[in-house]
Image (cartoon, rainbow, N blue to C red):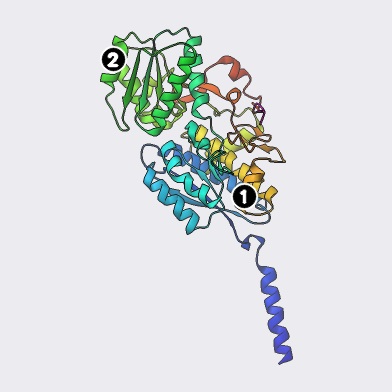
Amino acid sequence: MVFAGRTAAAVLLFTLAAVPAHAADPIKIGLSGPYTGGSSSMGVSMRDGAKLAAAEINKAGGVLGRPIQLIERDDEAKNEVGAQVAQELINKEKVVASVGFINTGVALAAQRFYQEAEIPVFNNVATGTIITNQFKEPDYEANYVFRNSAYDVLQAGLMVDEALAQNHKKIAILADSTNYGQLGREDIEKYLATKNVKPVVVEKFNIKDVDMTAQLLKAQQAGADVILAYGIGPELAQITNGMAKLGWKVPMITSWPASMQSFIDIAGANGNGVIMPQTFIEDQTLPKRKAFLENYYKTYGVTKIPTPVAGAQAYDSIYLLAAAIKQAGGTDGPKIRAALENLNEKVEGVVTTYDKPFTAKDHNAISRNMVVFGKVQDGKIVYDKAEDAKNAGVVRLKEKSSN
């Protein structure tokens, strides 16, 4: 009996020793975005960038000896679905953090559940200015919402300043009817007011609209010499196509989603010359970017990222979260939040190298100096300004706030 007992014990010990290190409980991180529908090129690029980062981290041993497990959910770019997904990820999947949110409306509807559960949520694409201000002090003791995309106030200011620098006098604003479009339109109008400029026309369009004739005729009749447009790829493309039908061509400066593959595909040659703020251009000037792009192309069998900004920012967000979990020494939500607000180590990403990107009062990792203008040129997004192209290998670091 004693011999049998020892044999059993030996077998048990051998079995335990044979279990690989990655049998440790995974660190579950939610990954939600629109993987179907009109916003899917943003969502898929975001998802695939995040998956590349998680795979690299896991290959290097994971975080605190545990692998990262991304729990994917399609929010369909619908506010109510996004809210349901958030609750499922929190209550059923028990995620310790979440990344994603392409659409501002979805973010505003869903991130409150993470806030209530004290689980950090990372907006790596959505840009509505209000997103990181939804749960600020003094109404809330702690804010669990973070972001590493260029929020709308930054983009609106850049768009207006560029239009004025080009000596345009009569500005038309076209914006979609979503939270994203209308909040962006509001930011543009507020910034124009600081320059004592009033737009000659402000028009609205809906998602899935394909005929912009009415809005464009009003802009043309008002004498507009530039269009500032806030929307996503498909509808922004219809604006360029509408101008082509009317035989009317004025410069067009848009919010960042004109870099979406859907814009390029739908606009075709009509999209050439359209410019938009970008945090990331597909160049291989730095080793980290080169490795990221080559890995992305090889892994997913493509020659370009459908929406480069979304893929790059998502990739970086996983590395930022991993650094925070490591610093926190575990997966406690308040400790991860505190670590994000005071990261000890620099995190090398493909958008930038993050050196204390957040504070307790500032949950936005991107400052205005980090954003460049991209331009649509024959199916690709390239640098609009020669100076930016020349300095592509220079890492743009966040301007330090006083907080």
Q: Position of residue 163 (x, y in %)?
A: 47, 13
User: Residue at 47% across / 25% down in the picture?
Assistant: 380
Q: Which amino acid does label 1 sit on?
A: Pro
Q: Give the answer, above or below, for where 388 lies relative to 355.
A: above
Q: Position of residue 86 (x, y in %)?
A: 46, 50
168 and 290: which is toward the camera:
168
User: Residue at 60% across / 29% down in the picture?
Assistant: 284
> Is 402 within the magenta?
yes
Extent of the magenta region: 399-403
The dot on residue 334 is: 1
**Relative to 299, 206 lies left or right:** left
Q: How crowded is mark 1: few (under 14 residues within 10 Å), some or many (20 or more)?
A: some
Between label 1 and label 2, give the one nearer the viewer.
Answer: 1
Q: What element carries label 2?
A: helix
Q: Earlier in the sequence, mark 1 or mark 2?
A: 2
Q: Position of residue 91 (x, y in %)?
A: 48, 58
**Relative to 381, 21 lies left or right:** right
- Regarding residue 115, the answer to whether it shows in the image is yes
Q: How far apart are marks 1 and 2 (CA)?
A: 51 Å
Q: What residue type is labelled 2?
A: Lys
Q: Is mark 1 on a helix, strand or loop?
A: helix
Q: How crowded is mark 2: few (under 14 residues within 10 Å), some or many (20 or more)?
A: some
Q: Where is residue 77 in the image (x, y as percent from the top left)?
A: 39, 41
**Relative to 198, 281 lies left or right:** right
Residue to which mark 2 is pinned: 218
Q: Quadrant of the C terminus?
A: top right
Q: In which quarter of the image is residue 8?
A: bottom right
